[in-house]
Amino acid sequence: MKVESEMIDLETEDKTTGATGPETLEERRVFLTQMALLGGALVGAGCSPEPKGSSKSPAGPPPAPITKKSHSEPSAHVKPGQLDDYYGFWSGGQSGEVRILGLPSMRELKRIPVFNRCAATGWGATDHSKELLGGRMSGDTHHVHLSYTGGTYDGRYVFVNDKASARLARINCETMEVDKVIDIPNSQGTHGIFPQRHKTGYVFCNAEFRTPHVNDGRDMTDPTKYGAMHTAVDGEEMVVKWQVLVEGNLDLCATDYQGNYSFATCYNSEGGVTLEQMMGADQDHLYVFNLKNCEKAVREGKTIKVGNSPYPVIDARGKDSPYVMRVPVPKSPHGVNVSPDGKYAMCAGKLSPTVSVVQIDKLASAFAGKIKPRDCVVAEPEVGLGPLHTAFDGRGNAYTSIFIDSVMTKWDINKAIQAYKSPDGKTPNPVIQKLDVHYQVGHTNASMSETKDADGKWLIALCKFSKDRYLNVGPLHGENDQLIDISGNEMKLVHDGPTFPEPHDAVIVAKDLIHPKKIQPRTDARFAMYSAWAKEDGVELFKDNRVIRRPDGTVRVYMTSQAPNYGMREFKVKAGDRVQIILTNQDNVEDLSHGFCVSLHDVNFLVNSQDTNSMTFTAAGPGVYWYYCPWFCHALHLEMRGRMIVEA
């Protein structure tokens, strides 16, 4: 089985990559064949017959030709000293972090530690971060989304999930630091998340793994008693408000633009616990949650409690209800993405070569029983083997990542709807172009794509395998993030970007919407904690350098720093003391960070300009232990040090 990639006005291998033609392409095709055989077997085993209005069949028409038009192409080259046009927020996958890139240069600007231990900054070991993380040192960040107001990004917060430990974190865009982390109750595998778009309201979190409810040892061997939670979190307060219990696995998440609905793709409507059991049915669902009805149920007490959890739960397992509707779509859907005009929710098939287009303004009639849920599907174009996610350019075109075929498919939404209405082969093929990417693309997103202001300039393909694209660095290969110009009539690959494994998602945000501070603003909740400690001990954080032995035996060492000196050149403690270093950076200069590292004590943390940070440790045996500044701050940086004298 050979997977063919359809290209319009492009050579067999794209011109910008430097790949060597048929031999390189054929090596990739060998790998793809193995993947496609598995995918084809799975699709053939259970998928529905050819979907109504399919844009492609074995004897179907080729993609529509591209009409050449001249346009001013944006440049991916950003000269030294120039700034990028966009911020890119990348999830870090199993690294547990979020990364910030500049686009179109694809330069990595910052790594934000979230659920992981970061040796450079001390995150995960500093007092405040340990409290936020509850002592856990790893996580798995999949989906990253910004807060909204009026259908576009408001530049306030970044939300990101932890699939490993069912958590949601919030990053404050003023400082690009985590300010809140909460646990999602009654959930495992918290995967898809999405904020409301009309305001910073709820952030919805999907539990991918079905578990018993209550998960305390009962019903462990009876999967019919399992379920998964769709959780509503208040994005301002970062507290759980309510949950909806459904029977199927919940995958990706989305919201509409009016605040009426949230969406979750569901695979494993069979209720299986093995791979084979999860693929028996021809169809799965798009869950549609009616938010006003859910809120009414919570107000009226039409909820249950699960175990010791205090949060109200709407039990919506089984049949459709005023709270949840199940729109049938081909089996094992993955991504769900809403078009910038707010009209359509696109469900990518994964095990079907189709994208199901759901018309959002039909949902009210379906909830009212006037039409069937499936009547909300208005198109189902065939876009390739293994469709996963869809992005938009704001010009009526959609771009779907195709995993098995290793292509990005560009297609016309309106033509797909026309073809579905008149499946007679006379309607023009909605597929415009297929562009090879390298290799096995997962998530995709376009500049401002998930807002009403999608601008159609750049598309990112987050490829899961890099294989032969870079120098060999050993068994663990980097991922390959490919930047594609979509400003014209055809997609053009312009950049390969190696990334440390494994980004799962990204959003591309116009730079004018993001306004970070250059000096620490001291507005985060952690500064109230430091101020409370200082008040207890009669200390002024920006002035005093003192050692305080607390009634509980803790030794608090208050210290200031100003390049190239610490305010305290030495301090004395006793062996075995619980020592708490509270360091305040007096420098009020942009990009002048200090740190504090204690030799042989596993203490190392960052303190930005006008910042305070702290870490607690146990003093080792008697001796002299130097502390020093690990962040270069001055010509006499190496001399910025002091002694911790540990007495017996």
Image (spheres, rainbow, N blue to C red):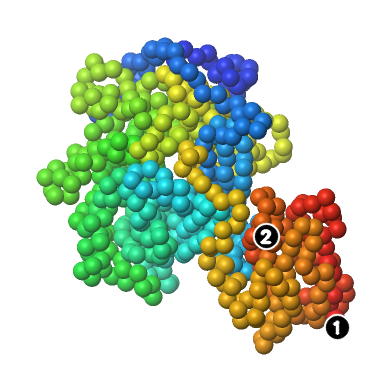
In the image, residue 530 lies at what x, y percent?
60, 71
Toward the right, the furthest residue is 623
Q: Nearer the viewer, residue 242 or 348?
A: 242
User: Residue at left 33%, top 25%?
Assistant: 412
Q: Is residue 483 left or right of residue 554?
A: left
Q: Nearer the viewer, residue 488 or 503?
A: 488
User: Residue at left 60%, top 16%?
Assistant: 21
What's the distance in space between the residues labelled 2 and 1, CA to CA?
Answer: 30 Å
Residue type marked 2:
Val
User: Residue at left 32%, top 48%?
Assistant: 198
Q: Is residue 4 above or below residue 250?
A: above
Say which residue label 2 marks: 607
Q: Nearer the viewer, residue 118 or 52?
A: 118
Say which residue label 1 marks: 648
User: Residue at left 46%, top 12%?
Assistant: 9
Q: Is residue 568 above or below residue 146?
A: below
Q: Quadrant of residue 46?
A: top left
> Who comes first in sequence, dot 2 or dot 1?
2
In the image, residue 420 lies at what x, y percent?
24, 27
